[in-house]
Amino acid sequence: MLRIAVPNKGSLSGAASAMLHEAGYRQRKESKELVVLDPENGVEFFYLRPKDIAIYVASGKLDIGITGRDLLLDSGASAEEILPLNFGRSTFRYATKPGTAKGPEDFTGMTIATSYEGIVAKHLAEQGIDASVVHLDGAVETAIQLGVAQVIADVVETGTSLRNAGLEVIGEPILTSEAVVIRRNGADAENPQAQQFLRRLQGVLVARSYVMMDYDCRAEHLERAVALTPGLESPTISPLHNEGWVAVRAMVPAKEAQRIMDDLYELGARAILTTSIHACRL
């Protein structure tokens, strides 16, 4: 039985459960459920605090976990990222009052407030900067106003809350994070159950990234059309009843689908359709 940790709350929780559901796994029906057994798939899910997941996985008590890259690195746990999941993206940056500092090189002797002490301390050490780090849980924007620190380090999305607090982002991003699948360092990478789990999630990622495109085109335009829709190995091509016409089917990147449809139409293709892909294996 594969034992997997899933975030029980926060921004990663709903998206992680949605992906697991798409991958064919049973998920909890109520937020109070802490453990869900999925015997048909040989998996047991444990719903834990996102910050604790890396610790549990590193201990070997759980085989796999879904958490944020930032939380994994901040924990210092003996666990490694094995698959990025393309959701829960965030950027971790420094911020301070205008005129206080231009970048980390000016932080010497200052105090930095953050909820991610491990990440910040490591970043400062790598830059050779002698600054103090104070750990605060929750929002850290008021730390400067209250005199606890001169600088904060936090997740920045739009920067609106920082501007509202009279702060500005400085320096380059410390870290770009997203949801990731993790396992213990030294764990068996060839574990069949774990490999199947990863294949299912990879199938969801591909299904979300591609659409299936079908269209009809004149045979004399086929080579140019296929250049626009090469598919993964090659497109499927079938002759139509009307002589000189063929039907083409291929997977195309979802974000490029509208542009490709425009280009195909200009080539003379017609009956251009796209359909969602719910699951796949490549």
Image (cartoon, rainbow, N blue to C red):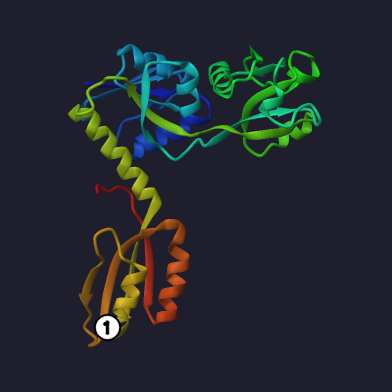
Is residue 33 in view? Answer: no
Q: In which quarter of the view is residue 142 placed?
A: top right
Q: Residue at x 28, y 67 (%)?
A: 249
**Residue reaching furthest to the front:** 128
Query: How many numbered dots are placed on residues in this image?
Result: 1
Residue nearest the observer in this picture, 143 or 271? 143
> Looking at the image, which residue is at 30% across and 44% down?
203
Residue 29 position in % (x across, y down):
40, 27
Residue 263, above or below 125: below
Q: Secondary structure at mark 1?
A: helix
Percent x, y for residue 184? 32, 19
> Considering only vertical position in the picture, is 135 above or below 69?
above
Query: Residue 204's image quarter?
Result: top left
Where is residue 26 drawn, in percent x and y? 31, 30
Quadrant, the N terminus: top left
Dividing the picture into quadrants, the one containing residue 78 is top left
In percent of the image, x 44 and y 26: which residue is there?
Answer: 67
274, above or below 199, in the image: below
Residue drawn at the location 72% of the way across and 16% of the way down: 110
Judged left or right of residue 240, residue 258 is: right
Q: Amino acid at mark 1?
A: Ala
Say which residue label 1 marks: 219
Q: Is residue 98 visible?
A: yes
Q: Position of residue 138 (x, y in %)?
A: 63, 19
Circle 1 crowding by C-alpha within 10 Å: few under 14, some 14–19, many from 20: some
Asked whether 144 or 255 is in front, the reply is 144
In the rendered image, the residue lying farthest to the bottom is 243
